[in-house]
Image: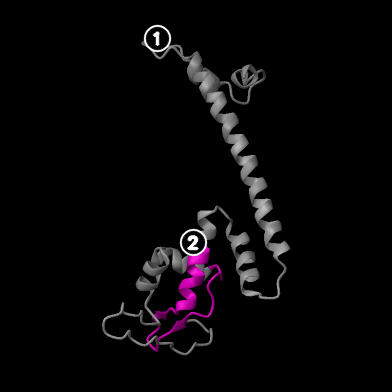
């Protein structure tokens, strides 16, 4: 049972007839997950990591999520879609919630993430070039000799990585 303080239930009034029905708040975990575009399992995971705090519970212990909770979950989902780590997301959430923050802090985190992505892309492109060279060298016929398997078997031995050097 969580020791977090309970937030008062917030209800949005039902829409006037003829208009789209307003959403009722708070909602159970399945509804919150659906509205945020995440699974209930991921929602619990984010909560366990402290990314989503102060979630209210009913007297019987069921989680109750507010519109603000779902908005935070959407923020987390979008940050994950962009490849930010959980640690970066926690920092970004703190900055998002701090209306006194300097945008330079956010930009610095985003730029570091771009730099990391660029390094990872370059490494993957190098892997792709190596594999393309190996595939080009392989006859792909009924013969048992295979330069792809030979290269994999040579990993970590002196003079290994011939395909990488040839690129």
Choose between 101 and 92: the one closer to the eye.
101
Instruction: Please tell me which residue is depicted at 64% across the width and 48% down the height of the picture.
Output: 114
Choose between 103 and 50: the one closer to the eye.
103
| Magenta residue check for 70 | yes
Residue 148: percent from left, percent from top = 49, 20
**Colouring of the image:** one colour
Horizontal side, residue 39 vs residue 92: left or right? left
Q: Which residue is mark 1?
A: 143
The residues colored magenta run 49-77
Q: Quadrant where the C terminus lies?
A: top right
In contact (CB < 8 Å): disc 2 and disc 1: no
Q: Which residue is mark 2?
A: 77
Instruction: Please tell me which residue is depicted at 42% across the width and 67% down the height of the picture.
Output: 36
Horizontal side, residue 165 vs residue 53: left or right? right
> Does residue 25 lie above or below 138 as drawn?
below
Q: Check the image and name the residue furthest to the front.
A: 18
Q: Based on the displayed image, in which of its 4 quarters is residue 9 positioned?
A: bottom left
Instruction: Please tell me which residue is depicted at 43% across the width and 11% down the height of the picture.
Output: 139
- Mark 1 packing: few (<14 Cα in 10 Å), some, or many (20+)? few
Residue 67: percent from left, percent from top = 45, 78
| Magenta residue check for 147 | no
> Does residue 3 lie above or below 45 as drawn?
below
């Amino acid at each position: 049972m969580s020791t977090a303080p309970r937030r008062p239930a917030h209800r949005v009034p039902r829409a006037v007839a003829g208009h789209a029905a307003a959403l009722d708040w708070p909602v159970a975990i399945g509804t919150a997950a659906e509205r945020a575009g995440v699974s209930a399992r991921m929602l619990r995971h984010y909560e366990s990591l402290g990314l989503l705090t102060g979630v209210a519970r009913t007297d019987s212990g069921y989680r109750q999520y507010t519109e603000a909770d779902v908005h935070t979950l959407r923020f987390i989902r979008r940050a994950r879609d962009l490849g930010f780590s959980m640690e970066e997301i926690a920092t970004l959430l703190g900055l998002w919630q701090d209306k006194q923050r300097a945008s330079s802090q956010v930009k610095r985190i985003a730029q570091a993430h771009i730099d990391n992505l660029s390094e990872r892309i370059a490494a993957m492109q190098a892997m792709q070039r190596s594999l393309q060279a190996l595939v080009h060298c392989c006859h792909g016929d009924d013969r048992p000799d295979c330069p792809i398997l030979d290269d994999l078997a040579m990993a970590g031995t002196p003079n290994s990585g011939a395909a990488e050097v040839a690129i």
